[in-house]
């Protein structure tokens, strides 16, 4: 009589990681879809004039801007989550908890985006809510990075040139909270300006770290050294 063999721990771990990836991808996809569903069509009755349509679309400009910004940051979170998890082969309870925090923030982004589009130019609290949701997502990504490396779950654990980018974006989101109150009526502009600055600084820092890393590596033209000393 044949017996069912228990799969190796590595196979079980890879399946668990695959399920975690599948759940995360599904939440990201749903959140991105909900962002688009919040874009309303102007109600102008039958046979509106082109001028009326143009005016109505312009009036919805803040909603379109909030959609583009939120879609962008959501796609960045998805990319960074995959980057932090690409070397992970086995899950850990702490890693699952941190991922749930990330997915919680991503799920709340459509609400925060709709709030930003409707009242972003009127109240500082709206910028604080939007920045707070994004700060939670970024903090969760940083915790995922730390957990994967601290528990030895990442096969390629170690500092990466792009590591500071997430910290810079987190600082930008935190600075957006007081900026929303200091510049009433221009909180969205201040938020986007801070993100652009953090993005440019992050690009510069990453490029510099990569150059430093490639400069410290042995040149391709040098002959490899025999470790035996012969």
Image: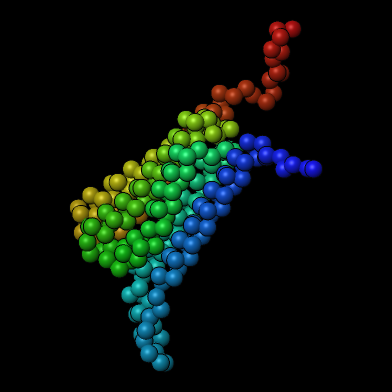
Q: Which quarter of the rendered picture does the N terminus lie within?
A: top right
Choose between 158 and 11: the one closer to the eye: 11
Q: Is residue 129 above or below residue 156?
A: below
Q: In the figure, is residue 194 to the left or right of 26? A: left
- The extreme right residue here reads 1
- The extreme top residue here reads 230
* Residue 186, position as x, y percentages in the image: 26, 59
Choose between 57 and 107: the one closer to the eye: 107
Dividing the picture into quadrants, the one containing residue 90 is top right
Q: Which quarter of the rendered picture does the C terminus lie within?
A: top right
Residue ID at (44%, 52%):
103
- Counting labels gives 0
Q: Is residue 209 above or below residue 124?
A: above
Q: In the figure, is residue 137 to the left or right of 115? A: right
Residue ID at (38%, 80%):
42
* Residue 48, position as x, y percentages in the image: 39, 89
- The extreme bottom residue here reads 47
Task: Please indicate, yes or no, whether residue 211 appears anywhere in the rendered image.
Answer: no
Residue ID at (47%, 44%):
96
Residue ID at (34%, 80%):
55
* Residue 107, position as x, y percentages in the image: 41, 58
* Residue 18, position as x, y percentages in the image: 59, 47
Task: Please indicate, yes or no, whether residue 124 appears anywhere in the rendered image.
Answer: yes
Choose between 130 and 212: the one closer to the eye: 130
């Amino acid at each position: 009589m044949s017996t069912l063999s228990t799969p190796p721990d590595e196979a079980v771990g890879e399946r668990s990681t695959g399920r975690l990836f599948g759940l995360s991808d599904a939440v990201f996809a749903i959140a991105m879809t909900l962002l688009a569903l919040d874009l309303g069509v102007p109600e102008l009755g039958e046979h509106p004039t082109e001028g009326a349509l143009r005016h109505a679309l312009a009036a919805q400009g803040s909603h379109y801007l909030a959609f583009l910004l939120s879609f962008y940051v959501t796609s960045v979170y998805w990319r960074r989550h995959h980057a932090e998890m690409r070397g992970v082969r086995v899950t850990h309870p702490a890693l699952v908890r941190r991922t749930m925090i990330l997915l919680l923030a991503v799920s709340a982004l459509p609400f925060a985006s709709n709030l930003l589009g409707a009242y972003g130019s009127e109240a500082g609290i709206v910028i604080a809510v939007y920045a707070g949701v994004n700060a939670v997502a970024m903090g969760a990504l940083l915790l995922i990075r730390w957990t994967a490396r601290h528990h030895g779950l990442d096969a390629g654990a170690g500092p990466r040139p792009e590591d500071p980018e997430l910290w810079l974006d987190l600082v930008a989101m935190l600075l957006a909270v007081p900026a929303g109150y200091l510049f009433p009526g221009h909180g969205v502009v201040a938020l986007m300006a801070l993100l652009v600055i953090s993005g440019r600084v992050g690009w510069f820092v990453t490029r510099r770290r990569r150059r430093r890393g490639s400069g410290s590596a042995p040149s391709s033209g040098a002959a490899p050294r025999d470790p035996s000393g012969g």
